[in-house]
Each structure stands twice: as structure tokens, then as C-alpha cells.
Amino acid sequence: MPVPRRQVGSVCRRRLPGNGPGGKPRYAPGFYVRLRRRGRDVRRYGGPDRATALAVLERLQREVDREDLLGEIAESDVSFGEFVPRYLEYAQREQTPLAYHSIRNLIPNRLGPFFAHMRLRTIRPADIEAYMATRRRVKGPTRNRELSALSGIFRHAQDLGIVRRNPTKDVRRSSEPQTPLPLVPLGEQQNLVDAVAEPYRLLVSLALESGMRLGEMLRLQWRDIDFSTSSILVRETKGKRPRLLSMSRRLRAILEEEASGRTRPLRGPDPVLAGACMADGSLAKAWRLAFKEGAARIGRPELRIHDCRHIVAINLVRAGMDLPTVGAFLGHRSLVSTLRYAGYSDGSAAARAARLLNEIQAGEVHARVKTDVPS
């Protein structure tokens, strides 16, 4: 039999001094919630009707239950330095290898020296702001990544009952200027593939034909490729949602040639990019250098491997694919992430404005206006 929930208050009306006509008591408009919280009797306005006030009482009851639970698990005096190894062990188990690789050195080497001797429960937003002040020379995205790493530590500490709140929520993030996306013509895209030496060329071909993220390509296995249906199953994604990709004819031919050229039979869990992934889940240095050298050979040394994903998105938008479909292909969780490619479509506002300006300069618009004017 379920245990009945403890009632922490009641709904009432506030009585006014004096009586109304006929000696009836007078009440203030609306209904009030009365409860005992943190050892004190509290009364607050609940709403214009009893149903609304009961909903407010229910919400307050949940808050009181949560406070009672946290009261049973007292805030610990664990220091930041003592908690970091525990958090890194959790992160290695729960996060993707690339995500763990990005914080493995960041937390002990950057955050650790500043917060190491502070108790987790005593760290306040002002302390975090003081740390951010020491990082003014680095770019905004770098500061935001450090703040996100710090937030992850406090979220895990909250789950364990070590702290009651996450102080990073009250710290404003740095502004991140939107960097322009690379515009690489189709001819240069093939030149980039040809400029990368073997066997590193497979990475660039896969990136430019599939639009997959680097971590998705590094974790891609031969069992995820179905040549009978020309499809690729991306199992481990940033959004934790597997997605199915259809291979282009060129990508299928590249992967079939790669599979037939292997010296030993391929097994299911064998990685497609053999030797590209390091033990910590990052891209091996030789593969990274091969890409940078190839980009420099075609006169685009600023290109990164992730830019191949942007190039694929721009190709699709220019070909006329709608943004929701592009977002689904790339594995975006929100259309907001895909909107950055909207201006690259031939149907964008800038493209329509350019066509109209061309018509104006050619006199076509004036001619059309004259014919539309009634005589």
C-alpha cells in the first residue's frame, strides 16, 4: 500500500477586519497558501481561485520534499581538488572519448590550480568571475568551454548530494563572434582530396561525402556499412541518437576499394579509419598533419577537418535541399544549428536581392512597371 504524501500546508482565504452586511465576515480577494517551511509559518498569495492555489501548494510541497531530502544528505566539505579525480572517472565512463579528451587536461591544469583548495560548497559565482578575470587574454569560446567544464563538475556534485546548487548558472558566458564558413568550390574540394597523401586520403573523402563529425568517423566500424543497401549506420553521435546515411556512388566505390585492399579479412568491429584514432579518442597526429599539409598545398592552410562538414552542408543548400532535411542529414538536434547555412542558398534573401538588382540595372523592372500601369 503506497505511503500517503505528507501534507505541508493548506489553502485558505485572508479575513479582513470587521464584518460586512448582515454581520458576515469579509475576505480579501483570491486564495492564499499557508505552509510551514524551514521551521517557519509562511503564507503567500496562491491565485484568484481555489484550483490555482491548490496547484501552487502542490509545487511548494515538492520543493519542501526536495529540501528535506537534501537536508538528509548534508553538504560535504569535499574540496575541489579532491573531487576532480572522482569526476574525471565518471566523465571517462559516461562521455564520448573526444569529450573526455577535451576536459582531461583542462580541468586539472587550468581549473585545478585556481580552485584546488576551495571547498565545493563554498565556491560562489564571485569566485568563478574572479577566475574568468584571469583568463581575459584567451578568446571567448575558450572561456566558455572552461565554464562548461566547471558546470559539469557541479552538476555531478549535485547528483551526489555534495552541493545544493550550481554556481556557474549565475555567471554570464562570453560572447562568441560567428566566424565565416569556408567557401570552397567543387573543383578545390576534389583537389583537397588529391593533395592528401595515402593512406590518409580516406579520411578526407569520407568527410566530404558524408558530412560526419570527426568523432563519428573515428568510431565508424565496418559492421556499420551495408553495401547491399548503400547505407551507413552512425551509432555514436553527439546527440546520442543514431542516424542512417545513404552513400553516394563515389563514397561507395571508395569504401569498396578500401575494403578489398585490406591485407586481412575485415571483422565487424574493425575501424574503417584504421590507425587514425589514438587511445584517448582523438585524431592521431600523423593524420592531422596529413590533412593540414594537403590543405596548404591547395592554398587553403586555414581549413580544419571539421570544415569539411560545413562544406557538405553548403553543397546541399546550394543544390536546393531544404534546411530541415540538411539538419537531419547532419544530425542536428535543433534547426537553430542549421540556420547558419540559410544565407548560402540560391533562394536566400541576398540571392533574391542580387537578382532584382540585376534586373533593375538592365531596365527590366522599369519596363515591367510601365506595362503594369493602367492607361
Image (cartoon, helix red, strand yellow):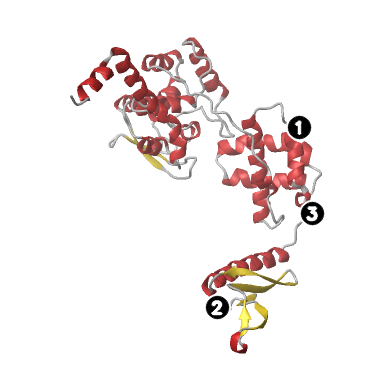
Which residue is outermost to the front?
A: 375
Q: Quadrant of residue 345?
A: top left
Which residue is disc 3 drawn over? 77
Number of residue marks: 3
Mark linked to residue 370: none
Relative placement, left or right, of 91 versus 73 is left
Taking depth in this image into account, of 278 and 358 the one nearest to the observer is 358
Q: Tag 3: residue type?
A: Asp
Residue found at x 77% / y 38%: 130
Which residue is outermost to the left?
A: 375
Q: Secondary structure at mark 3?
A: loop
Spatial CA span between label 2 and label 1: 54 Å
Q: Tag 2: residue type?
A: Pro
Q: Tag 1: residue type?
A: Thr
Decide which of tag 1 and tag 3 comes sooner along the chain. 3
**At which x and y percent is residue 228?**
28, 36
Taking depth in this image into account, of 127 and 47 the one nearest to the observer is 47
**At which x and y percent is residue 195?**
44, 13
**At which x and y percent is residue 96?**
55, 40
- Residue 213 shows in the view: yes
Which residue is outermost to the bottom?
A: 22
Q: Quadrant of residue 34?
A: bottom right
Spatial CA span between label 3 and label 2: 36 Å
- Residue 264 shows in the view: no
Which residue is disc 1 drawn over? 134
Q: Tell me the quarter of the image containing the N terminus.
A: bottom right
Neighbourhood count class around disc 1 (C-alpha, 10 Å): few under 14, some 14–19, many 20 upward = few
**At which x and y percent is residue 139?**
65, 28
Which residue is disc 2 drawn over? 2
